[in-house]
Image (cartoon, rainbow, N blue to C red):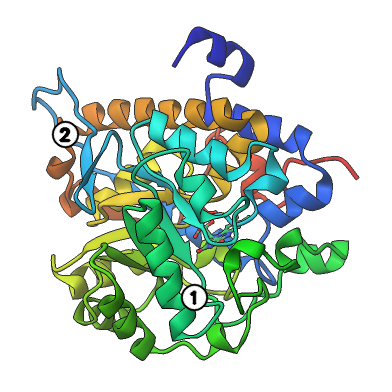
Amino acid sequence: MSDGAADSLGRTAEELVRLAAGRLRREVWDYLSGGAESEATIAANRAAIERMGFVPRVLRDVSRVEERTVLLGRPLALPVFLAPIGSLALLHPGGAPAAARAAAASGTTAFVSLMAEPGPEAIAREAPGLVLQVYMRGDRAWLRDLVARAEAAGYAAVCLTVDSAVYGRRERDLINRYSSSMAADRAHLGAGGGAQITAHQSGLTWDMVAALRGMTRLPLVLKGIASPADAALAVEAGMDAVYVSNHGGRQLDFTLGALDLLPPVVEAVAGRAEVLVDGGFLRGTDILKALCLGARAVGLGKLQGWALAAGGEAGLRHLLALLAEEIRTAMALLGCARLPDLSPALLRSLPAPFMPGPLSAFRGLREGQGLNAEG
Ligand SMILES: Cc1cc2nc3c(=O)[nH]c(=O)nc-3n(C[C@H](O)[C@H](O)[C@H](O)COP(=O)(O)O)c2cc1C
């Protein structure tokens, strides 16, 4: 982390969140930070992480800690990637191109939402090794065409999101009478591909997943898996990665926390595919808990959005540098010089979440109030 970035953006991730809170209009802050209905899923994501405590090992030579990993055959400098966010342009003028560049500059990758402006081809020109995240917005021929576009644009993998058969009821947005520009049509979605959720998406079944497998040799990721039964079906359908996610609490209210969903999925996948996870991850220790439980890498949703809002591309690069530092610190203190040294034996589950310490980061978020005082 450069001293210049630390001076303007802070020395902790919480400072980035506070900067974002000061910069975003109230309804945009709520759109980014809120979830479906009672927001129980958002709380569950944090509670699942905060119920896990470490049992560190000592005397294991951590003079050189290495947080590198491999995701879908490509090296990652840290076990963290940017989750797909369709509306990055709402948060900062740099939008999805800035996120793609920040990921690449930090040695990681970004999942590029099909909804993101200025569209898959233009974003792919910003950075190598990106993953195109697809919502089903047309028929089988539409999907075939889109996959061909992803291949031609140089995407490293394709990710199909399957937890959004319908749009979740986001009550902050309903109360604010706010509708993000996501409702508008996107020219880059191609013929027949309006941005609204349609019967193509709500009618999606495993047949289309099998058809997708037949359309490309690119690695495929299925995002939005919660049940181990679905994880097993995903592997049988030839998916290269199973992405455990409850969409950051934006879709089904009262879903179990992502970290609680993870172990049964890891067991069902049984090493036949990589397992990714997102939902509520804010810190290096959060990320290491998921890796202890078998995840290959962790996606950042809202935290990515806050960092982008705080400082654009530089904000995101700063966030990823902070997380790498937190990860290295915690690995050393856990007695793990390399990520494969992480295991479930380093974790124990408590009946209730830890009490937040007096300097606990993100307290405003925990209380569900947000930090944004405006309006
Ligand atoms: C503003 C916003 C927009 C999102 N857009 C998409 C999207 O276009 N496609 C998708 O698969 N997931 C989308 N997600 C979900 C994220 O990819 C991710 O699953 C979730 O945010 C992770 O939880 P976290 O926010 O607690 O980190 C979006 C999330 C947010 C916050």
What's the residue type where badge 2 is placed? Cys
Asked if the beta carbon under badge 1 is closer than 8 A to the nearest atom of ligand 1, the reply is: yes
Image quarter in which the N terminus is found: top left
- Residue beneath disc 1: 163
Relative vertical location of residue 180 with respect to residue 305 in this rendering, above or below: below
Relative vertical location of residue 137 with respect to residue 13 in this rendering, above or below: below
| SS category of the residue bearing label 1 | loop
Sequence order check: which comes first, mark 1 or mark 2?
1
Q: Position of residue 62 (x, y in %)?
A: 15, 23
- Which of the two residues, 95 or 293, is positioned nearer the viewer here? 95
Task: Give the quadrant of residue 230.
Answer: bottom left
Q: Residue at x 39, y 74 (%)?
A: 226
Q: Position of residue 198 (x, y in %)?
A: 63, 84
- Residue beneath disc 2: 336
What's the residue type where badge 1 is placed? Asp
Residue 126 visible here: yes
